[in-house]
Amino acid sequence: MHDIAAMIPLDSGDFAMGSEDFYADESPVRRVSVGGFAIDPYPVTNDQFAAFVTDAGYVTEAEIAPNAAMYPGANPEDLVPGALVFTMPSGPVHLGEYRNWWSRSHGADWKHRTGPESSIVGPGSHPVVQVSHADGTAYCEWVGLQLPTEAEWEYAARGGLDEAKFTWGDHDPQEEHPLANTWQGRFPYESTEVDGWTRTSTIGS
């Protein structure tokens, strides 16, 4: 069950939201104010989401076939339940085309993270994946909460370090001593291990 008592309360405040150092859609940097709120210290797990699905009889969007009327001209074979799955290519690819490493897998959903042959047996404490914004909203309503806004999430993630590039400051030690589980190696075809962090199917910077 969701542990509401473990949520971290944050006071209201303002901060510099966004960045002009990485991705174009993160700019421009602007001052944003948020009211006080509380946020979970960890992502929702497979076990927590499973309890919600069982109790509410909920079916995620990835488990529902797309509405053909919304995709005129689509191949009927693609109008089946599924979700995008990361697939590591064998060598360098054009980084301007996400389809070089993302592909739609028929049968991929929160219970089958990488396709119909996969399962979540075992990693019950792992973060739930293959859920949409609507799925997350439904889960939060079930536990009596709501999803944080983009501004609230970034305000919390910054940990009080206003205008810093990263949650720990401005220095980027990721290649030598990673402080976050971002991609190590040459994306998206080479994944290496540094200080125990391994990346084989995670998108990062």
Image (cartoon, helix red, strand yellow):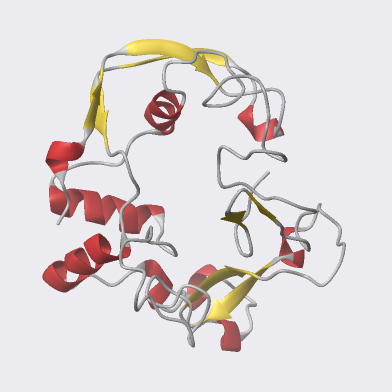
Q: Which residue appears at 65% of the width and 77% of the height?
A: 73
Name above or below for residue 68 compared with residue 96: below
Q: Which of 146 and 46 is in front in this view?
A: 46
Q: In which quarter of the image is the N terminus?
A: bottom left
Q: Tell me if 2 is positioned left or right of 29 in this view.
A: left
Name above or below for residue 151 compared with residue 87: above
Q: Which residue appears at 32% of the width and 61% of the height?
A: 125
Q: Which residue appears at 38% of the width and 57% of the height?
A: 127
Q: Position of residue 139 (x, y in %)?
A: 24, 55
Residue 154 quadrant: top left
Q: Farthest front residue?
A: 195
Q: Which of 179 and 150 is in front in this view?
A: 179
Q: Position of residue 169 (x, y in %)?
A: 58, 20
Q: Where is residue 189 in the image (x, y as percent from the top left)?
A: 78, 63
Q: Which residue appears at 34% of the width and 75% of the height?
A: 122
Q: Tell me if 55 is positioned left or right of 109 in this view.
A: left
Q: Tell me if 11 is positioned left or right of 102 in this view.
A: left
Q: Nearer the viewer, residue 179 or 17?
A: 179
Q: Where is residue 170 in the image (x, y as percent from the top left)?
A: 64, 19
